Image (tube, rainbow, N blue to C red):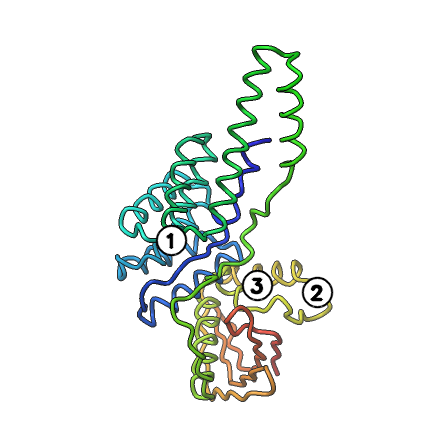
Amino acid sequence: MKSKNIHLISALIASFFLLSSFASNAQSNIDEIKFLLKDGKYTRAETLINKSIEDNLNDPELLFYKGIIETNMGKNNQAIDTFRDLTERFPELPEPFNNLAVLYAGKGQYDLAKEILEQAIKTNPSYLTAHINLGDIFTKMASEAYNNALEIDKSNNIAITKLSMITQLFNYQPNTRNTKIDSIKEKKKTKPLKPTKENLSKDILSRIENWKAAWENKNMEDYLSSYSSSFKYPNNMNKSEWENYRLNRIISKKIIVISLSNIKVKFDNKKAIATFNQNYKSGALNQTSKKTLVFVREANHWLILEETSK
């Protein structure tokens, strides 16, 4: 069994106990970080997490996500330092121990990984992921021992049989894709307040401003991330064609200045419809149009589903 068969799910799919109440801006950043991680935008997530940590040096959840981001980016030595620091500062949390052990296992340091997983279990005996990973560590160590035995005696039937059994039993490929990052437990479960239309409208206005700023700054990553995965592409274009079209139209401009006025937002079922006057200036081009953006909620964000101009 190869070392990559060590159970890696927890290293990439975070399950974390919230130990304290966090400031609203910190929680907002964490939501944004989760959204970026889901989309595989690790560089932007890393920039945001580092900025957030500057203002929240003792926030264990932010530090935990820092380690998750570093792991996803292949910065394993930095991730090891981050998780080791967490285990020293917050020894009551089992998750950092588990993720630290997985990283050491990936480096082939199975004895050290075993000791760290045992510490995770000591911290929380019901932490299932650590038990599974510990079993995989023992299995890997056993397979190496049988391989060593076969190097001494290649015809040893006992070692051959047991190694074959291990290979058959543990020949699986765990899911290592970062598809979801949610806490499986929360210290407090409270019924969320229903957002008011005023707050929802503020959210929409904020998304429009971010979309406009990304367009003006020719920040294609932020601009394209403003659109829903179900966005209705114009002129029968597919996603790739439309993104290339917008890239060429936007990047080629030296300066883009956009002003919006008379913005109105209304809600229809689960959609938000924003209408406004848009003035677009770039070089000699000065164009005014009536714009409509239809937003839908995805992954706790308002994203553009439809875009029309008159």
Who comes first in sequence, dot 2 or dot 1? 1
Residue located beneath label 2 in the image:
237
Residue contact at pointers 2 and 3, CB within 8 angstroms: no
* Residue type pointed to by label 3: Arg
Closest to the observer, 200 or 97: 97
Residue 48 occupies quadrant: bottom left
Quarter of the image with the C terminus in it: bottom right
Residue drawn at x 70%, y 65% as measured from the top left: 237
Quarter of the image with the N terminus in it: top right
Cα gap from disc 1 to disc 3, whole angstroms: 40 Å
Mark 2 vs mark 3: give the one in front: 2
* Residue type pointed to by label 1: Phe
**Residue 3's spot in the image, x, y percent?**
54, 33
Cα gap from disc 2 to disc 1, whole angstroms: 40 Å
Mark 1 vs mark 3: give the one in front: 1
**Residue 224's spot in the image, x, y percent?**
54, 64
| 242 relative to 284 in the view: left or right | right
Cα gap from disc 2 to disc 3, whole angstroms: 15 Å
Residue located beneath label 1 in the image:
64
Q: Which mark is residue 249?
A: 3
Residue drawn at x 38%, y 65% as measured from the top left: 29
Residue contact at pointers 2 and 1, CB within 8 angstroms: no
